[in-house]
Amino acid sequence: MNPISDTFFRQMVSRAIRRDYLENVTGFALLFLQPLMLLAIYTFVFTTIFKARVAGDSSVAFVPYLAVAFWPWTAFSESVLRASGSVRSNAALIGKVAIPAEAIPLSTVTAAFLMNMAGYLAVLLVMQLLGTSLNWPGLLAALPLLLMMFLFSCALALFLSALQVFLRDVGKILPPLMTFWFFATPILYSSSVLPERAAALMKFNPMAWYVERLRDFILFGNFELSARDLAVPVLTLLLLWAAHRFFKRVSSHFEDFL
Amino acid sequence: MEPLVRVQNVSKIYPRVHRPGERLKAFAALLAGKPTVSGAEVLHDVSLEVQPGESFGIIGENGAGKSTLLKILTGVISPSSGHVSVNGRVAALLELGAGFQPDFSGIDNIRMKAALLGMSARRLDRKMDEILAFADIGDYVYEPVKHYSSGMIVRLGFAVVAASEPELLITDEVLAVGDESFQKKCIRWIERFLEDGNTLLMVSHSMYQVQKLCQRAIWLHGGKAKMHGEVFPVTQSYLAWHEEKNAAERRQRRSLKGESGQYRVESLQIEGWPDDGTALLPSGSSLKAELVLKSPDGRPPVALIGVMRADGTPVYGVASDYDQVQPLALAGDSYRFVIHFDQLPLLPGTYSLRGHAMDPEGIRLFDTAEIRFSVGGKSREMGMVQLPHRWE
């Protein structure tokens, strides 16, 4: 099978963007509307009903605290959920033309990230205009973080999309798992409010590390990193390598199972 | 010279994956690296090679494994065992509209397909006018492909493939969908493509097209290579096999029961050949046959001798009493007839020679014997016999 050519991959990404995002009446607007609506709902629930405050740091309002972590999470969960079903939903393509199959989940992830990052940028701008002080150099430092998150999503997407061809149950189990993962990640809260044992468990959640570093960089301007912080990026790259190998191993048999 | 396409002992078994249990088992076997052993075997131990500049035909009945072989060649699926290598720039036209996204416009699909064929965006821009001219579907290119007729889809697909300047073109029976003038355009393009030294691998049910375009062919039957080699013997055997199959079906329907009465055929032979149907006569050679009939009453019977195509279509028949021929009496009330066909004008193919025993009045037919023979040779003439002709 031919390696992915640039032109082909760009075509796949633009196809995914149009298919997943631009076919709605609201088009691009939806991209901002949907996360904004969710943000509004969470804000209402957590600030009006639960009177949530950011534990440990009263200088930051709850909404920016949530928003900075929320968009990257959405990019992550949306891309993994969409991509995990993408090989099956493109069965017609795989069975008929010789395409490098990994282009399908990878283009889906790329499209979801591009779209959500555009939304992220817009929201950050809106917040800055509304008076939240963001750490713009931190945003620059966040870029490699976001890139690593993207690679982490790619790894899961490759693994899950291939697995779902063989085990269709994956598509059913994944959405609730993703919801659980959302609540198990310090997005709506800070991990410092957790009881000790839960906080210890949090160390095993790579997404927790990602969102907390994003907050550190963008909101708090805290760039302190220790050697232990290498763990998640290294894990991400290892995972990506393993997922790619797994995908390559089984992708030549997709047609038999689709 | 390095072959462009090399297929070595390729087999394809589709594992059973319909029930969840079977799926899980097949997946476990795959992860363990075990070869698929149980399931539907659609190809068994097929090998072939195609040299650069050659054109090669794949023929066979529906379900013989032709499309599966093409899918393996194009890398859409991988073989269960065996080895495949394909070199050079390959373009494939397999199923109708394969890889087209129905919701996207013709232009978008051209871009996608071109990208799949390895064309860069810049090269595609240069070629776009050429593609649109070749496809010739007017403003429909801006419509979603789901509104297209099947002919328009083929036009679009072929136009992009033509523009990608492949070295090896692999086509399935898709061209049959286009209309007359588009088919001609495609054939002209393929002929020029071959003249330029490129390579063609095609599946077709039209033996005429295969003979016209290909030098060599493989006949797949039930997933196995039944015959492989020069295009003429392969296509002729394939056609003969079909004719025979049809004839056998017809015979079965009629459940023809020969009236075996008093006058019997003792033997029928083509001189110089055993009577097992292996007789192979060069086109234009002569055929000498001997028919021995048995008479119950000492009166010489009438012989009727005929030639027919393998499917039973009569070519020529003649009785001994028309020509007022008397047989040679042998011992034991047997009578020997010998007939010569000098310079047999039959075209290459499979035929049978029939000898009948009739009563001395030449009215009732009592017994029949049949012997098969083939006429060999390479000819693109059509039909059964060569009619003497001249051009002016």
Image (cartoon, rainbow, N blue to C red):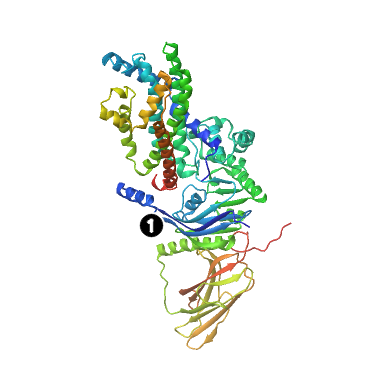
Looking at the image, residue B57 sits to the left or right of residue A247; the answer is right
- Across the whole image, how many numbered discs are drawn on residues? 1
Disc 1 element: loop
Above or below for B221 versus A11: below
Sort mark 1 into few (<14), some (14-19) or many (20+) by Cα contacts within 10 Å: some
Residue at x 55% of width, y 43% of height? B178
x and y, in percent, of residue B305 in the image: 54, 73
Indicate the position of residue B131 as horizontal and vertical percent values. Answer: 61, 37
The amino acid type, in three-letter code, at marker 1 is Val
Q: Nearer the viewer, residue A86 or A233?
A: A233
Give the residue pinned by disc 1.
B37
Q: Is residue A57 left or right of residue B147?
A: left
Residue B51 at x, y percent in the picture = 61, 56
Res B203 visible = no
In this view, the residue farthest toward the right is B392
Considering depth in this image, is B72 or B299 the residue closer to the camera?
B72
Report in which chain the residue with disc 1 lies.
B
Q: Quadrant of residue A214?
A: top left
Looking at this view, is A175 or A213 the one in front?
A213
- What percent of the width, then of the height, locates residue B389? 68, 61
B350 on left or right of B30: right
